[in-house]
Image (cartoon, helix red, strand yellow):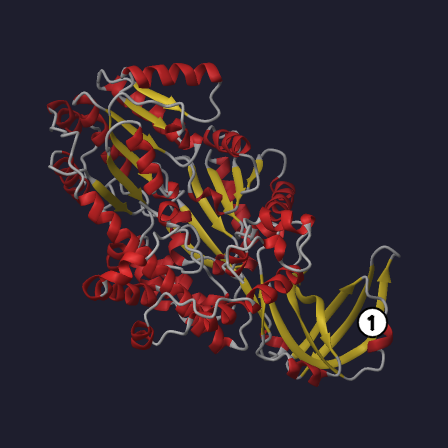
Amino acid sequence: MIEKTDIGELKGIGEKTKKLFQKIHIETVGDLIHYYPRGYDVYEKAVPISELEEEKTQTVTGAIYGRVQVSGNRSMQITTIHVKDITGTLKVVWFRMPFLRNTLSGGGTITLRGRVVNKKGNLVMEHPELFYPADKYAEKLDTLQPIYGLTSGLTNHTVMKAMKQALDGLDLTRDILPQELRIKYGLAEYNYAIRGIHFPEDKEVFYHARERLVFEEFLEFILSLRKLKEKNEKLANEYVIKPQPEVDLLIQNLPYELTGAQKKVWKEISSDMASDTVMSRLVQGDVGSGKTIVAVLALLTVALNGYQGAMMAPTEVLARQHYESITRMFETYHIPVKVVLLTGSMTAKEKRKAYDRIECGLARIIIGTHALIQGAVNYDNLALVVTDEQHRFGVKQRETFARKGGEPHVLVMSATPIPRTLAIILYGDLDISVMDELPANRLPIKNCVVDTGYRKTAYAFMKKQIAEGRQCYIICPMVEESENLEAENVIDYTQRLQQEMGDTVRVSYLHGKMKQAEKDDIMERFGKNEIQILVSTTVIEVGIDVPNATVMMIENAERFGLAQLHQLRGRVGRGKYQSYCIFMSASKSKETKERLDILNHSNDGFKIASEDLRLRGPGDLFGIRQSGLMNFRIGDVYQDARILQMASEAAEEIEKTDQEWLKNLPDYENTSSVII
């Protein structure tokens, strides 16, 4: 079966099901094959009742203790039993399954597998899978069932059925990796890997399959980046940007002195923009290290040279905040440079006015969102583009800017802490500057790692901070969009919290399914202190600067990668007030405590990222995934640091020894969406 075959050609996929697959961006059989499971249901050994952890799916074996009870009304009957082993007793409930009373009334030993939740201080297993008699569980022990990202109306069973059919038609000759490379790095053959990732017989097959697919993805990405770097290095500088005395004067007049790291990075940027070739530079700096002022200095220098500079922000609220702070700064220091804002939500009249000012060259600095690269915008002489890594500013976007006139210098800002060894590989087409120093006036954030029993105390602490005029964030774990639970999670939490806090405290929520205008409205109101507590998913990672926010509480902190937790923590500690971060964990495992303890004792993002790499083991693949960094289909740069380094070595070998193979390599399809 050819991978380009339409998904509708598969048996059992009619027009209605085809539309559901299209909703999750599956148009062809090839798209389906590369739609990897988002996780696996792993049937592991039973644990003693005393070792159960809340919010986890686990297995227990025990004797039915007491009688089977059925309560509730006709529409919602609840079947309840108690199961006992030598370590303790567990309450178990099923919904709408009254017939289980007959099955279980004989007593005996059973095995149950289900999610464990905390109800009024006691652990309860809700609606578990039942194995009766207990030894029936042996058939499923150690097996892995794929779980796919879904959309409303599409079931996991439908995806699995289509996947099995697609895999039966695989092209057995497809293997882009040379055999000697596979042997050298101990990699599985492609067909084995693609079957093993979807339907692994056991964990070993899964690990082996995944390693091969991650390696291939990283290798194609690295080779594409190197091609891009080669192309960029040959680009002649059409916009030679000379240093300007007004910029030096602004640096002297700022109410704070630039750190040594800021001065060093500014020197590197100035040198790049004045050189013979176009600048492609990444500024990698921890949250709060002062990257924005360096970007403003670059934009101002370009403007004073008679050219235009554009700064692309990931959200409208942040774009507006940048626009207002730059305008205010220029007014304060009497800098005669026109700054213009351009965002998608502006009225047609406002946009036309902005377009005119940009095209005639009156606007020297343009701040905006993705609207900056849309068709209607024509630049007069765009010499610099500053962008945030969240924008995944890629090859296509750069070409779009180039078509609007010339090859601009590009400056990418990143707050993601990545150890330098990995950054050199991942940003292989960019020169890297590192800001590893925080401004002297920043108070270090005070951290604490606590269990769920501390929640009431945390709420009381927030009330106290709010009474002093401060604001708070609460982060709920990211839930897969397909589960349709993300919104409920945050909305339910907000409702409960509002009752807890009372009418004098305004609590609101933010999640990924809201329209951009709604998100912007909430963030703007939070910025004005019209909302005191913002309950959010990780969409807040890229937010606005709210110096008044002093408390960040992260629920289920064990579900996040350390680097992401550190970035979330960076939402507070931005003003003159002492700030606090509360990492709340439901996990009792020693490993989780060790991981989170690193955050408890360090505010250094680069150190945290290195520790995150050190502590990651293959077992984590079933738990934490470091979201928010690089749009890879299966690879994870923290989890798979070792494979990334292997792929980098292999890329060097191929470049030296196999030019023919390199010529046939297609451009990595995600390069433009991953990074420039």
- As drawn, 232 above or below 520: below
Q: Nearer the viewer, residue 644 or 659?
A: 659
- As drawn, 544 above or below 622: above
Q: Residue at x 29, y 67 (%)?
A: 646
* Disc 1, SS: helix
Quarter of the image containing the N terminus? bottom right
Q: Please state the horizontal and vertical placement of residue 133, each as a whole percent of the image.
A: 75, 83
Residue 344: tell me if it is visible. yes
Q: Residue furthest right?
A: 74
Q: Please state the horizontal and vertical placement of residue 632, each as a whole percent of the image.
A: 41, 55
Q: Please state the horizontal and vertical placement of residue 48, each as a whole percent of the image.
A: 61, 79
User: Where, by quadrant of the figure, is residue 90 drawn?
Assistant: bottom right
Residue 590: tell me if it is visible. no
Q: Please state the horizontal and vertical placement of residue 69, each as a whole percent of the image.
A: 84, 69
Is residue 602 left or right of 245 when viewed as pictured?
A: right
Q: Which residue is mark 1?
A: 100
Q: Residue at x 60, y 41 (%)?
A: 501
- As drawn, 497 above or below 47: above
Q: Residue at x 10, y 24 (%)?
A: 245
Q: Nearer the viewer, residue 545 or 577?
A: 545
